[in-house]
Image: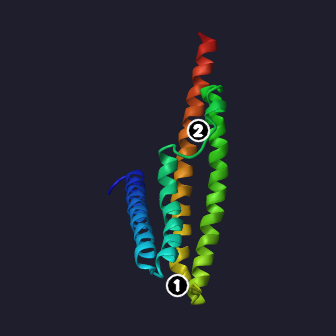
Amino acid sequence: MKNPVEIIDRIQTAMIILAGIMLIFIMLSVCLEVVLRNLFNTSLIWITEVTEVLLLYITFLGSAWVLKEGGHVKVDIILSRLSPRKISFLGIFSSIIGIFVCLILTVYGFKLTMASLQNGLYTTSALEIPMWIILIIIPIGGLMLLIQFMRRTLRFVTRFFIESKKNNTQFEG
């Protein structure tokens, strides 16, 4: 059996690839819409709605991978002035906040998805997409982001104690 970390990494890689494919699809479909409107004075009814849904999917499919790669916004001007131990402490603190936010997002996203499935809710637009299809990405993406924040917390805790040990060793010698 494969390592759970490797499985999570593969899932995140698949999710970011899918997000990239969706982004390319959005780009091509919006270009098609512009051409159709400007040259043929017509449009495709589904492009705007599908684009909106795919943007939601792209956000939740890619967020855990972006966190893993360190691509989320951070204030480098402040972090560059801090010691590695303080950076690790701030990383632990922000990761714990992220864990709680993702936990809430995942739980309530799941409840909302299940409620929309059980109640048979659909969008009020022309496509009448079942709401659960739109919402299901929230608990999936939230769970993956939660797992990544947990991994990040462990990494920062390890660094924090390594830096603490280095500081104690410097004073002993």
Q: Nearer the viewer, residue 68 or 72?
A: 72
Residue 13: name its quadrant.
bottom left
Q: Position of residue 161 (x, y in %)?
A: 59, 31
Above or below residue 92? Residue 138 is below
Q: Residue furthest left?
A: 1
Look at label 1 and name its amino acid: Pro
Residue 99: name its quadrant.
bottom right
Residue at left 47%, top 80%? Answer: 46
Q: Which residue is mark 1?
A: 130
| Left or right of 138, for residue 36 | left
Residue at left 65%, top 25%? Answer: 81
Q: Quadrant of the N terminus?
A: bottom left
Looking at the picture, the colour scheme in use is: rainbow
Q: Residue furthest top?
A: 173
Above or below residue 129? Residue 147 is above
Q: Position of residue 142 (x, y in %)?
A: 56, 62
Q: Dot 2: few (<14), some (14–19), or many (≥20) neighbours within 10 Å?
A: some
Look at label 2 and name its amino acid: Val
Secondary structure beneath label 2: helix
Q: Which residue is mark 2?
A: 157
Residue at left 48%, top 61%? Answer: 61
Answer with mark 2 or mark 1, whichever residue precedes in sequence. Answer: 1
Marks 2 and 1 in Cβ contact (< 8 Å): no
Q: Nearer the viewer, residue 85 or 162?
A: 85
Q: Nearer the viewer, residue 71 or 10?
A: 71
Q: Position of residue 152 (x, y in %)?
A: 54, 45
Residue 172: numbered disc: none
Kindly report which numbered mark, 2 or 1, lies closer to the viewer in this rendering: 1
| Left or right of 63, for residue 11 | left
Above or below residue 100? Residue 44 is below
Q: Position of residue 130 (x, y in %)?
A: 52, 84
